[in-house]
Image (tube, rainbow, N blue to C red):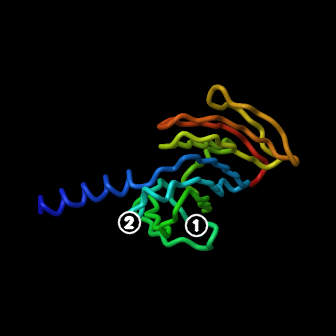
Amino acid sequence: MKKTLLLSLVLLIILTISASADNINTLVEVYPDGTAEITQNLVINSLNINKGFYFPAISPENIEITDSNGKVKFAVINDSFLIQPKKRLSTYNLKINYLTNGLTKKDKKVWELNYFTTHSTPIIFSFPESTKLIESSANSVIYSEDDQMKLGWKLAKDSSVKIIYENEFK
């Protein structure tokens, strides 16, 4: 039992550090019903990939992971993707896209969104035009584009965002 646990822990550490994401950009589009679509574009140093790597996810559904050659093999383990791209000779782009209901919760008319990242990333949250911002974490940039309210941050590793808002969706 101890031997299996130790082997699993070592494998997890190896897989976790085996890929180097050189650049990550995140877009979170929040729909009126609280569902969020997360799109993450990663630049991966594939020379460091041995068998695969873990990347965090938040209660993912309708998952699509692609690179320049099409769909990439992956598995969902707890709240992480185990991604197994083909080995390349250099860096390449990887796109992760999924839906989640795990970011938002509603209390009467007020929604609360909480997002935590384990990677340094610029992030943009996009809300429907009917959204009224009540409160957000410090240092956000707030702007409007295509009738949608957007909030942006440059998040450091292991940081979080909290957004409290209302919208007219019933």
Q: Residue beneath label 2, please?
A: 51
Mark 2 or 1: the one toward you: 2
- Helix, strand or loop for disc 2: loop
Location of residue 36 by image quarter: bottom right
Extreme residue toward the right, this view? 146
Check disc 1 and report the residue beneath it: 65
How far from the left and from the top, in percent, is residue 56?
47, 53
Q: Position of residue 145 (x, y in %)?
A: 85, 44
Mark 2 or mark 1: which comes first in sequence? 2
State the residue at coordinates (65%, 43%).
Answer: 111
**At numbered mark 1, what does the secondary structure look like: helix, strand or loop?**
strand
Judging depth in this view, the residue of 11 and 105 nearest the camera is 11
- Above or below for 163 versus 128: above
Q: Mark 2 packing: few (<14 Cα in 10 Å), some, or many (20+)?
A: some
> How many residues crowd mark 1 within 10 Å: few (<14), some (14–19), many (20+)?
many
Residue extending farthest top = 138
